Amino acid sequence: MSRVWRVVWSVGLASWMGFSAAANESERKPGSRQSSERVQFKQRMLDSLEISERQQEQVEQLQQSFSTEMSELMQASAKGRKELDQLLEKQAANEELEKTITELTQLKAKQLRLIIRNRKQMERILGKAKADEFMQIARKKFEEKRGRVRVGTRPEKPGEGVSE
């Protein structure tokens, strides 16, 4: 797996781990067992990194911001893919298809830039070693949650997987 896709999966995984704005919103709802488990896991994860309260706050704020921006981009991508499907269904002209493909490509580029920016900010807040440790914990949780490892569905550790 290429380095870019490892970064994409790693950062996406971190937001999936319960740092999202939506997850934080649901955590405020009483009686939500899953939300409570997510909060507890997130706190244990941050505690195990032995980082300061300030760093914890910065990481949570970063992940909330990342999740919100990524969610918006993903929604726009889904809308664009739906539009592309409709264009294909009605056998639209190549120019229309190309325009939509270009828009989708630009959205994907924005997603990758956001992921890279998030990763760099995470490393700035925690340092490279702690950011790597954070991702290692997140990978382990991801694998436990999935119940099994399937090639190409989880973030690879640097040096693992298929090299390109």
Image (tube, grey):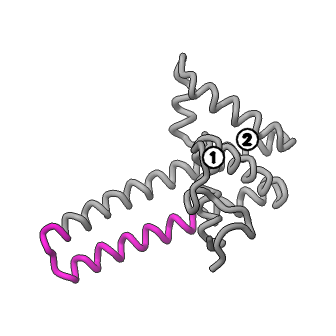
Residue linked to disc 1: 142
Relative to 61, residue 99 above or below? below
Magenta stretch: give its range: 88-114
Quarter of the picture containing the C terminus is bottom right
- In front here: 43 or 149? 149
Relative to 103, residue 119 above or below? above
Residue linked to disc 2: 57
| Residue 72 position within the rendered picture, expressed as x and y whole percent measured from the top left | 44, 53
How busy is the neighbourhood of tag 1: few (under 14 within 10 Å), some, or many (20 plus)? some
Examine the image and state in which quarter residue 56 appears: top right
Tell me: 150 left or right of 58.
Answer: left
Q: Residue at x 77, y 55 (%)?
A: 131
Q: Residue at x 74, y 34 (%)?
A: 43
Residue 88, labelled with which disc?
none
Magenta span contains residue 106: yes
Amino acid residing under circle 1 = Phe
Tell me: 3 left or right of 80.
Answer: right
- Nearer to us of marks 2 and 1 is 1
Q: Are marks 2 and 1 in contact (CB under 8 Å)?
A: no
| Chain-order first, disc 2 or disc 1 | 2
Relative to 119, residue 65 above or below? above
| Residue 153 position within the rendered picture, expressed as x and y whole percent measured from the top left | 55, 57
Q: Secondary structure at mark 1?
A: helix
Amino acid residing under circle 2 = Glu
